[in-house]
Image (cartoon, rainbow, N blue to C red):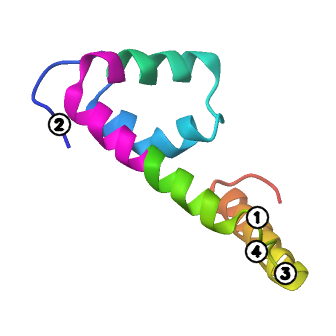
Amino acid sequence: MSCGDHHETSCTEVLARVYTYLDGELDEGGCGEVREHLDECGPCLREYGLEEAVKRLVKKGCECEAAPDDLRAKVLGRIEQICGEMKQTDGDPA
């Protein structure tokens, strides 16, 4: 997506980082770039608002249920496996 205007940070880059921004996982510099872009780009701001609403709705629907321990263990195991594979692909020792 692009609004057609020039921005310091591209629309595509901002929208790719919107969930990381919503989760508070960006450093201060990254947050500043996203906030600045959203302040000047109406289409991205609307998309951000939609993503924020979806995230709130999912959280509200799931806040009473915890993931089963076996599911949590499987997910964490898979994440570790993928991270190990990525390190091997990059040539880093595992």
- Would you say residue 56 sits in the magenta stretch? no
Q: Could you give the CA–CA distance between mark 1 and mark 4, rounded to whole angstroms?
A: 14 Å
Q: Could you give the CA–CA distance between mark 1 and mark 2, rounded to whole angstroms?
A: 35 Å
**Amino acid type of the residue tagged 4 in the rendering:** Val
Side of 33 where 47 appears, left or right:
left
**Which mark is drawn over residue 84?**
1
| Image point (79%, 66%), residue name | 80
Q: Which residue is mark 3?
A: 68
Which of the two discs, 1 and 3, labels the residue nearer the N terminus?
3
* Residue 67, percent from left and from top: 79, 75
Q: Could you give the CA–CA distance between mark 3 and mark 2, rounded to whole angstroms?
A: 40 Å
Which of the two discs, 2 and 4, labels the residue nearer the N terminus?
2
Which of the two discs, 4 and 3, labels the residue nearer the N terminus?
3
Q: Could you give the CA–CA distance between mark 2 and mark 4, rounded to whole angstroms?
A: 34 Å
Residue 61 figure quarter: bottom right
* Magenta stretch prevailing secondary structure: helix
